[in-house]
Image (spheres, rainbow, N blue to C red):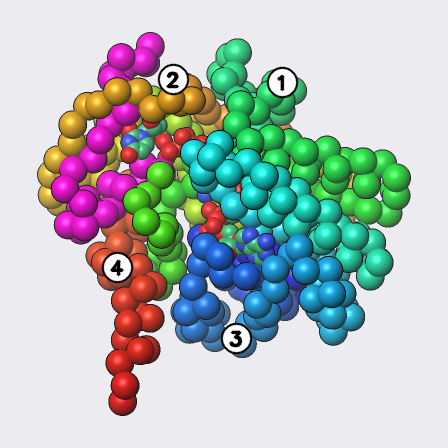
Amino acid sequence: MRILVTGGAGYIGCHTCVVLAERGHQIVIADNFVNSSPLVLQRLGRLTQKVIASHRVDLRDHEALNTLFSTYRFDAVVHFAALKAVGESCERPLDYYENNVCGSIALLQAMVRAKVRRIVFSSSATVYGDPQQVPLDEAAAVQPCNPYGRTKAMIEQLIGDLCASDPMFTAACLRYFNPVGAHPSGLIGEDPSGIPNNLMPYICQVAVGRREQLRIFGNDYPTADGTGVRDYLHVLDLARAHADALEYLADTGRNLTVNLGTGQGISVLQLLRAFEQACGREIPYEIVERRPGDVATIYADPTLAASTLGWRTELDLDAMCRDAWNWQMSNPDGYRALERVRRIPA
Ligand code: NAD
Ligand code: WQD
């Protein structure tokens, strides 16, 4: 298939491009690089041994989208492009609704015009908010508790409405739990700008000496060791699910909304200890106040992904930590170091 990957230069997008290329698909990336570096594209070229077409496009730019859809005849779209920081979404809600929701509407309109009727959408476990019970299956109530989560729920709805209006239009909404890790080559990985919001990149930056110590947000949760419990999954397992979802849509013509996680809850302290094993050094930490908006425990019931897509995670917590550390060690300053090298005059 020829696939448009929006947000393909980002963390999950670039890993998915590798998997899609390995399965023989042709990829075109559209990204405005608001949260990524064009230097990822060189790395993708090295990894895939293919030239991956890429266009600097903001999804809200209808003209640019129309040009893209008239330049290529796409069979499907994998839609990652979004802003994703929960805290920032509370401070700048309109920017989040505009970027994520309006960007998605513009994309869907361009798809409808070009008669491209297959989409895989990056949704999030965050649509469940503070769950009533775990593990969470897809029948659990959708009640996001921050603007970022509400953009995801809205986009799921508008995709659902579009599918209802046109039976030829098929969609898979993938609700990711907590993706971590990196490609084992160490060539691509997570490279947050500024202070990382998420646990794994923060631990990586402490381990590599960029930050002094981890702050653990609360050890008084009703969990085994008092720290928050999440469902971490390897980004390559997650990437594989996108290729599986595309094949599912093509083969069955059915729509799907599905959780993607391991089904196993891991606490902050468990993740920290596994990471220490992987990197062979101690990670200093202090316990601080709970982070507002955090829930105690959330993990997936991934049964539906197995029965529909035949998808299960294959990589364990040790592999997640090993690959995250390998990426961080090989690229202590992320892609920025490459940018600096590029700026040095010859
Ligand atoms: P990321 O920020 O690394 O990647 C998103 C990419 O989209 C970036 O390259 C960014 O430059 C691009 N982008 C943003 N707005 C754009 C726009 N208007 N036009 C064009 N490009 C734009 O994030 P990620 O971690 O790779 O996440 C990918 C998707 O998965 C997002 O939709 C995110 O909400 C979702 N998701 C992520 C997680 C997670 O923990 N990382 C969990 C659940 C869901
Ligand atoms: C995990 C655990 C923290 C950082 C967020 C978004 C969610 C999704 C994934 C996109 C929690 C603790 C964290 C730190 C800590 N993204 N922690 N110290 O909160 O499950 O999910 O990212 O869709 O929408 O909400 O992930 O990695 O931020 O936190 O103690 O410096 O680590 O309290 O228990 P979270 P996280």
CA distance separating discs 1 and 4: 40 Å
Name above or below for residue 169 compared with residue 218: below
For discs 3 and 1, the disc positioned in front in the rendered view: 1
| Label disc, if present, on residue 296 of the rendered structure | 2
Identify the image quadrant of the N terminus.
Answer: bottom right
CA distance separating discs 3 and 2: 44 Å
CA distance separating discs 3 and 4: 26 Å
Q: Residue at x 55, y 31 (%)?
A: 147
For discs 1 and 4, the disc positioned in front in the rendered view: 4
Q: Residues within 10 Å of mark 1 (few under 14, many from 20)?
A: some
Q: Residue at x 27, y 42 (%)?
A: 202
| Label disc, if present, on residue 141 of the rendered structure | 1
For discs 3 and 2, the disc positioned in front in the rendered view: 2
What element does badge 4 sit on?
loop
Q: Is residue 195 left or right of residue 140?
A: left
For discs 3 and 4, the disc positioned in front in the rendered view: 4
| Label disc, if present, on residue 50 of the rendered structure | 3
Viewer can see residue 172: yes
Query: Along the polypeptide, which appears first: circle 3 or circle 4?
Result: 3
